[in-house]
Every structure is written in C-alpha cells, then in structure tokens.
Amino acid sequence: MASTVLGRAEGRARVVGAGSGTLLGAGLATTWLSLLVLLPLGAVVWRAGEGGLGRFWEAVSTPEAAAAIRLTVGASALVALVNVVFGTLIAWVLVRDRFFGQRVVEALIDLPFALPTIVAGLVLLALYGPGSPVGLSLAYTRAGVVVALLFVTLPFVVRTVQPVLLELDRDMEDAAASLGAGRLTTFRRIVLPNLLPAISAGTALAFARAMSEFGSTVLISGNLPFRTQVAAVHIFGQIETDNTTGAAAVATVLLIVAVVVLAGLEALQRWAARRA
Amino acid sequence: MRRSSPLALRVVALVYLTFLLVLPVGLVFWRTFQHGAGPVVDALTRPAVLHAFRVTAVVAAWTVALNTVFGVGVALLIVRGRFPGRRALDAAVDLPLAVSPVVVGLALILVYGRFEPIGGWLETHGLQIIFAVPGMVLATVFVSLPLVVREVAPVLAEIGTEQEQAAWTLGAGPVQTFRRITLPAIRWALAYGMVLTLARALGEFGAVAVVSGRLVGRTQTATLVVDQSFQNFDQPTAYAVSVALASVAIVVLVVVNILRSREQSRA
Amino acid sequence: MRTRVTALLAALVLLALAACGGSSDKASSTPTSGAGAALPAAQLSLVAYSTPQDAYAQIIEAFQKTPEGKNITFTTSFGGSGDQSRAVASGLAADVVAFSLEPDMTRLVKAGLVAPDWNAGPHKGIVTDSVVALVVKQGNPKGIKGWADLVKPGVEVITPNPFTSGGARWNVMAAYGSASAKGADQAAGVAYLEKLFANVPVQDDSARKALQTFVGPPGKGDVMLAYENEAIFAKDLKHQPIDYVVPDDTILIENPVAVTSSSKYPQQAKAFVDFLQGPAAQAIFAKNGYRPVAPAGKSPYAFPQPSGLFTIADFGGWSDVTKKFFDPAGSVMADVEHKVGVSVG
C-alpha cells in the first residue's frame, strides 16, 4: 500500500516542514521503532548466534525444524496465492456488483480482525473437524492448517484492492469493450496491471500474517512433528525444552524469509506502479 | 443494462465467504447464546472477568493511543520525508506482522526482563516492564504496529501536498497545517486504522500471555480468561467473553464503515 | 434482564472505584480459636502450574483462617508448569512456587532462585502425588484395560507432545516403565514407545489442550494418557463424559513445591508451605483429586494402589531421564518421533 503510493509520491517530491523537523521526526520514529521492534528482534537474532554458526545451523537443520519451516513457509505461500485470487475476486464483487445484503458482507470482511485467534481456531475445528456438520474433517491435516490461515488472512488483499478499484477510471475498460475486447481480456490487460501494486501489498501482509500465526493453527493442526507442526509451535517446543538458542535460530530463519519475501513484494509493487 | 460483474463471480465470492467466514462466526454466536442471554450475563459479571475486561481495556487504550500518534508520524515520514533509510523504515514497519507471538514474548523478555541489562536498569529505577501492564502494552503495540501506518500512508500520498503548500505560503506553521489541513484529510483512514488496532489489541493472546505473568486479578486479560475457561471446561464463560470482545470490535468497525461511506458519498 | 444490566453497570462502576491498587484476594477473616503466633503481615506471591488452581484457592482461604496465616494476603498466578517456571526464571516475582514436575524446579535452582536443598525436608519437597492413568470415553467402549491395549491396531491414543509439554513426559515414562520392566529391558521399552506413538494421531502442545481434544470438541481418540488428578477433575468435578483406568504398572507423579530464595517474606512463605503439607491442606488436595503425601483423612475418591508402581528414581532421576529421553538433539523420544514421522508422513 504505502510503497505503491511511494511510486506516485516520488513524482511530487515535497517535504513538509523544514529539513531539521523531518530529521527530528525521523530520529523519534527510529527511536520508537528501535525500542519496540528492532532491539527485541535484534536480541533474538543475537541469541540465535550465541552458540556460533555451527550451532545455529544445527538447530535449523534438524528434521523437525526443517519440516516445520517448510510447512510454515509453504502453507503461507499457498495461502497468499489463494488470497490473490479470492481477495481480488471478492473486492471486485464488492465494488462492481450490487446485491441485497452487500453492506453486511462488506462489514463482515473485517471480522477475522475482530475475533481472538484462539476462538477462531476452536470454531474452525468445530466446523471442519471430526463431527463436522459439513461433513469435512480437516483437523490434524495440513489442509486444516491452510483453512485456519485463510480465515485470518481474509481481509488483507480485499482491503488493499478495494480502494484502488474504486478509484479506477472506467473509461479505458469501456473503450476496450467498445473495441470488441472480451471481459476477461479487458480485465487481464487493463484492470489487472493497475491492481497489481495493491495486490502485491495485500499479499505481502497476508503472507506475513500467515507466517506468524500461532493461535488458530495450533488447535486444528494437531501438532504432529514432521507433518502438521508449524514453525511457531516448534519454536515453543524448543523454548519448553530450554533450548532458547535453538528457538531463536528458527525464529531468525523465519524473520529472514519474511524480510526477503516482503522486500520482493515491495519491489514488485514499485515496478508495477511505475508501469501503471 | 449490462451488469458490470458476472453473476458467477458473485456466487463464487459469496460461497467462499460463507464457508470461511459466515458459518464459523455464526457458530460462535449460536453456541454462546444457545441457552439464552442469562448465562452469558452471569459469566460476564463475575469479578475476575470484569477485572480482566478492565485490564484489556487499559492495554487496548494505551495501544491505540501510542500506535495512533506514532503511526501518523511514521506515515508522514515515509510518504513525505526525504532521508537516508526511509525505505528501510518502510520495510521495518511491516515486520511485526510476520513475527509469531511466541517470538514477540521471547524477544521482549530478552531485552526488558528483570535479569537483562536494560530491563534490570529500568527496574532499579522503579519501572517494571515485563510481568506488568507496560510489557503487555509493548507486546500489543508490537503486533499492531503496521495497521495505522498502512491505512494512513496511501491517503497521504493520494492527497498530495498542494493544500499544505498553500497553507504554508499563507503563513501557517507546521502544527497548524497538520491540524487543519492534513488531519481532516486523513481522518477516516486514521479512524479505520485505529479501529483495526483496537480490534487486534482486544483479541491479542499469544504475545501478551507470555509477558503478562498471568497474575490473577492483576495482569489477566480477557483473552487469557477465554483460554483458561476453555481449559477448565467452562465453555459458556469462554464463549461469552469471546463474543463480548468480538462484539465491541465489530460494532466499532461497522460504525466507522458507515460513517466513512456516508462521508464518501457526500464528497 | 434489566436488573442484570444494572448490576453489570454497578459492578463496573464499583470495580472502577475499587480499582486503584490493592491485591486480588480479600484480607483475612476473623481467625478461629487456637494458639499459634500470628506472623507479621505480608503479601505472598504464589506462582503455580494450572491444574491445582481451585485447590489453592480453597487452601489459601483455609490458611488465612489459621493464626499463622491471618495477616497474609496472596497474589496468584497459574499457567503451564514450564511457562511458569520460565517466567520466574525471567523475573516474575514469586515467594512460593509449585510445579507439576521436578525439572521445572531444577531450572530455578540453576538460576539461583531456589535453594539447592529445597527437597531436603521430610516430604522431599513434594506436596501432592498422582499417577498416570488411562482415560477413556464414558463406558469404556473399546474395553481398554491396560498398556497392551494401547498398541493394538486401530486404537487412537492421545498424549501431548513431550517436547512442548513437560507434563507429557510423565506419560512417556509411565509407558516406558511398564514395557521395560521398570527400565530393565530398554529395547522392549523403546519398541513399545514406537508402537504407541504410531497410534497417536495428534500431539497437543499441553496436557490441558490434550484433554480438550479428547473430550471435545472434537472428541478425538479412544484413550488418553493423563494424570489421574486431571481425569478426576474432568470426570467428577466438571462432569465430562469420561472414565479412567489406573493400570497396574504406572509411574508415581510427584509435584514439587518450594520457597524461593528471593522471597522477601521467607518466614511467612515457609509457614504456608508447611501448611500445604499439613492435614488441612492435604485434605483439600485430596478432595480435588490429588493423592495426598501426608495423612489426610478420608477422601471422596478411591485412589487405587497400583501393584507395579514405580517412580522416576527407578530411571535415575529427572536429570538423567531428560538427557536420555527428551533431548531434542538426540534421545530416545527424538528417535521415536523421527520414526513415527518418517513412517507415517
């Protein structure tokens, strides 16, 4: 979101306030972020390195740790992709369509934000676990993990795409239609490029959230090592067995993955914003 | 007149939302009020629960206040500022979202715990962070950090600086400009960001659990009560408190949404 | 309904007024008659694991009625045994600590927060006992009678993950002990563990969560390994539809308690711990499903005496056992989980 916008703002580079004011503000913000985010996360990374690189590698390459990391990253990536499709679709329907109860649906989208994650997990389990009224049993499977993650990440792509769709100038679409282009072609070649920055921004957030999710997946995942144990629970296990360094190591790997993916998505945003 | 969106899309979207969202949430509410409102009110008026709501409210209020102030500041910096490391700041803002609550607790204790250098120094000067409300506020601020920034920043970029520049040339100071030009423009985005922060703060469990010390009647939040109640087979209390929390968040979300769309249709 | 809402509002207002400072527990009531010097006033911080929460609430009330305890107030904290132990090690203030297994106490000894001679007293620092029991659904539909039934094909066993739940280790050692003739035949014991964990479809991260999984929703599993006191809690105190079987061969679970060396009120804390091991408190523990360590009069629960009861000492004590069985980097259980993961996944 912000970076899409950075692309456009760059064209009108202006600074509000005198230079020293900005620097002071930057200093304050950096201090705040440091105390709150960078210092604690730095402490984790530091802790991870305490036993040296060998110990770090050992901790993250055990079969359990590797399996947990793979499951977490894999499930988060899958969830991000599903959200790209369904998030855009839902945003489209909400913006371009008119139907009874639309306002309600609109408000419902933010619901996953409102529900505590442990409750979300429990309810998903009741619905999609053994004894499910819907006849599915996803508990203790990787599919269950994915469903739980889809729930908590639902709002992200929808909410980033919606405002952009609203702003979108329809003239080009109408022009394409009058020239005979099919709906899908119009979408693919005119609308989508404009949505790409917003989609990437939302996907970044959804991916990040999925990576960190602990509360709702624990209940539905079954915590089976190698099969359904997500990295967050594995980390918890390491802490429980007094292997804080190992826990910090796996946490650091997750952080690195998150930073890489977030940076990549941000680059995608900027590239797409320049093209649009 | 040609429908601007095919019916098929609508159906797919609604089916997806029904199975993923409506059914689960509906189930929560149904289970809560299965036996009427009486047991719900009973559960909610117990002293321990009321106290937990108070703790949650205090932590949430601080979180929203802090994240609003710094969120707007950081958004302004990211969008309008020109300084080395601006991109890094932008990227750092999203980072908390990717950190699991288990790690948040660990990280905060590593820095602010009593036996750590910084935490120890603070504690000898009378400021206890971990296992007290300040630590819980820190943890909650951490996990909700990006929300205000990511709502306000796009709007700031959209509106551009022309109006602010005009105010400047007319002699307004930076604070005045902010108060009378910038703030009204970002008002709804900011409100929405604050509400998202509130919702996240009300529902946060993992990170707070670790740094709270679970002191009964002191640092127990409503979500900790939910967890404890589930584990003690006291499902009515667990569901009642969850629904209470969710309802507050939902009500505020809906109100802001309505007000915002009304404002947008007027504009 | 309106009166209830008014009550809710009134309660909120009262709470807000009474909110400034103050402890959570009420101050003492009038003391009963009896000799015994009242101790100087103090506020003790009790940090304990989660399951005896109700028991401690009742015990604290009883303690405050005694002459020693009448000026003493409490703050309490309950949570997973490992979580609580780590919290104290990270600086959570505590005068009395009570955990579900010894390694959580040892952690504090290593951190210098509990004296190394905490277990030197007559009860060796133990305040309650229990045993590992086999919990089944009401009516025992699968006819589970002992350890051999757990490794039959098609039987689903629920137990927490011993690497995320310290308490789950009692389960593993009970299973191992029964199959290995108290540790004599290690190969048989390990083989049993492998077969057992092949029948475990889900390993929750804590004992209470495992109980939730078993009882439901979702109600998964045919038999669950749990502490006897947990089974009594769920069955008799919370009326959940379960039964339990105490096998002949099982391990004695011993829950430690100690005064911290950082306590500001060591005299009062020690008085409380002494009270815990006295008849009044032990009777309360017994009522809550724990096996008392001191004579406690009659208990509402039959605590069957397993003929083949063994203790952790039979395997060399917790420090040896932790290293040999539960080291994530390489141990019996790490190998078992490995085998289960590889063969099933």
Image (cartoon, coloured by chain):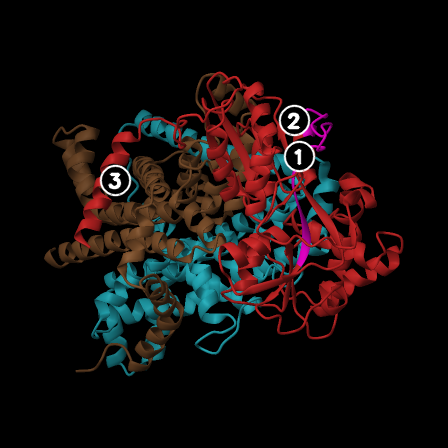
Q: Which badge, 1 or 3, is on the more N-terminal residue?
A: 3
Are the two marked residues, 2 and 1, in contact with CB atoms closer than 8 angstroms? Answer: yes
Q: Where does the magenta region start and end?
A: C109-133
Q: Mark 1 packing: few (<14 Cα in 10 Å), some, or many (20+)?
A: many
Residue B233, given in percent of the width and then of the height, sits at 47, 56
Chain B colour as displayed: brown
Q: Distance between the Cα atoms at labels 2 and 1?
A: 8 Å
| Mark sitting on residue C105 | 1
Q: Give me the chain letter of mark 3.
A: C
Chain C colour as displayed: red
Residue B140 versus residue C20: which sits nearer the camera?
C20
Residue A66 part of the magenta-drawn span: no
Identified by mark 2, the residue type is Val
**Secondary structure state at the residue bearing disc 3:** helix
Q: Is residue C135 above or below residue B140?
A: below
* Residue annotated with mark 2: C114
Q: Give me the chain letter of mark 1.
A: C
